[in-house]
Image (spheres, coloured by chain):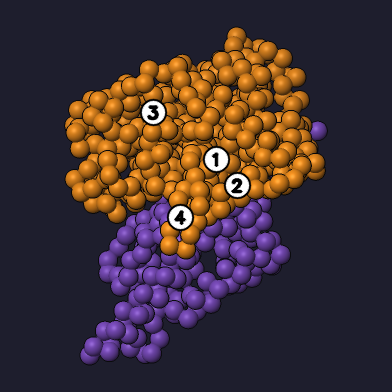
Amino acid sequence: MSTGNTTGQNLDSLYQEIILDHYKNPHHTGLRDPFEAEVHHVNPTCGDEVTLRVHLSDSADGVRRVEDVSYDAVGCSISQASASVMTDLVIGRSVDEAMAIHADFLTLMQGKGSVEPDEDVLEDGIAFAGVAKFPARVKCALLSWMAWKDATAQSLAGADDATEEK
Amino acid sequence: MTLPGLLPELEVVRKDFPILERTVHDGLALVYLDSANTSQKPQIVIDTMVDHLERHNANVARAMHALGAESTEAFESARDVVAEFIGAPERDEVIFTKNASEALNLVANTLAWARGPLEIGEGDVVVTTEMEHHSNIVPWQLLTERKGATLRWFGLTDDGLLDTSNIDELITERTRVVTLTWVSNMLGTINPVAEIARRAHSVGALVVLDASQAAPQLPIDLAAMAPEERPDFLVFTGHKTVGPTGIGVLWGRREVLEQLPPFLGGGEMIETVRMERSTYAGIPHKFEAGTPPIVEAVGLGAALTYLGHLGMDAIHAHEQAITAYALEGLQAVKGLKVLGPLDAAQRGGAISFELEGVHPHDIAQVVDSRGVAIRAGHHCAKPAHARFGVQSSSRMSSYLYTTPAEIDALVEALEYTRSYFKLDG
């Protein structure tokens, strides 16, 4: 009756080595200056929280870049690893590129396991494909991504306001 | 294995609960340790509800036909069963609500609307505790914000007990309501409710007792309590006492219920309606507007009758035996820390814990993969978690059908969790 193997495989599809590595050694943690926007997002069902700052470059060449994303997060392995992977993916990209990656990750997470991730775009993010099969954990994986999108939108809006004032 | 205090013929009792036979994840036996969240249902509750729907369904108190009479009889008989279960001084003091949250909100809202002696105003104080479920905090925040009153609360000791050292500062002439849980859903703590009720009544405050976690596991006899130690209101929910969801109970002292204004307006709660104004029915119907959850009430009646047959003293002894066994087993897991009292005699059957190096979400996920169902998160008690400096915790909660072998299965699953996350051996 024991189906230890099946069970193990199910769990392993959720807890990929890449996820556990990022969980144990998360990248870009801590809150840093400078930043244009800081947000605080909470997963009300479990209490996981993230405080996240975004710093965008000036748009001298018409293109704004994600200079830095810094964060302070409390949460499960999935939410912590997802924040780490997200910062790897968006820092250094143009805002438009980063938003496109965000959209791809969102599609992957909302696909209930039916979406084949593109490693060229999502890199370590493909490890989260298994999470999409665990509906209760999708919110964990999306917490920091949603916070980043919110903070980036606020940074852009703030910059527009500043431009208008001038 | 067997332990002193376990329910006699536990294996036979378990057969009353069909869900305990099922498997999860392709063939693993279900180990259900989430009963403080919701309890499982015995066959008699399921059958009684089906029988009502199949044979007696009609609206209550307004249908002049055979089925209407049968349905009304079944619904009102359930009220009698509830009254007996809690030892209510009067059966009409038992009001059906949809859950414990609605019962607490009923009290807080009608107090906010009350005029006369029960009116709460600026400078008045409502006292709660730091170990409450959110449903016994937020309604009182809303009340005090609306009325310009102040919400204060008992803190907790490091051991997870209610800190009553400043009771004289909290319960004063300005205190109008003291509301607290009998048994904590997170820490398991059993509170000294008689002592607190006595103090509250000495200053003329009303006492609200949240018995959501107490009703499933402690014998309750309101009529036998000394009047000064008896709460003015007691609430619990049906689904934690092996009944269905969608049905809760508010018991209130007649004199206070009669002074409070209605909660919801509608059918059933009126005496007569004119376009200019209406007059209201007496209790309990005054607080039961609209068609009530009839089959749920009938199911709750069957559930409490079932608990009565097993005997609440026997159920309490069983819970204590299992809780003691679980506390011992859990603490043998390396890196595991129990939040709350460590003496089974002083606590209920919900045990929250932390496992160093693994987040509660991940613990629940891994033990679920072994068929073990526990809860992870803040258990709707964020302030209590904040008090102990933790974001969230894992919680196992047993009930009358829990076996020592199921506790062993949890402990094994926790050891597996440690190895899965490669914590040192």
Few, some or many C-alpha atoms within 10 Å of disc 3 (few <14, some 14-19, many ≥20)? many
Question: Residue B370: horizontal and vertical position, in percent?
Answer: 67, 36
Q: Quadrant of the N terminus of chain B?
A: top right
Indicate left or right for B23 with B397 as reference: right
Labels 1 and 4: the sequence-earlier one: 1
Q: CA distance from mark 2 to mark 3?
A: 26 Å
Instruction: Tell me the SS state at disc 4.
Output: strand
Q: Which mark is residue B231?
A: 3
Q: CA distance from mark 3 to mark 1?
A: 18 Å
Task: Give the residue at mark 1.
Answer: B96
Task: Give the residue at mark 2.
Answer: B292
- Nearer the observer: mark 2 or 3; the answer is 2
**Residue sitting at 40 percent across and 39 percent down?**
B258
Name the chain under label 4: B
Q: In the image shown, does B67 or A86 lie closer to the viewer? A: B67
Q: Amino acid at mark 1?
A: Phe
Q: Which chain is orange?
A: B
Instruction: Tell me the SS state at disc 2.
Output: loop
Q: CA distance from mark 4 to mark 3?
A: 31 Å
Tell me whether marks 3 and 1 sit on the same chain. yes
Q: Amino acid at mark 4?
A: Ser
Labels 2 and 4: the sequence-earlier one: 4
Figure colour of chain A: purple
Labels 3 and 1: the sequence-earlier one: 1
Task: Give the residue at mark 4.
Answer: B278
Name the chain under label 3: B
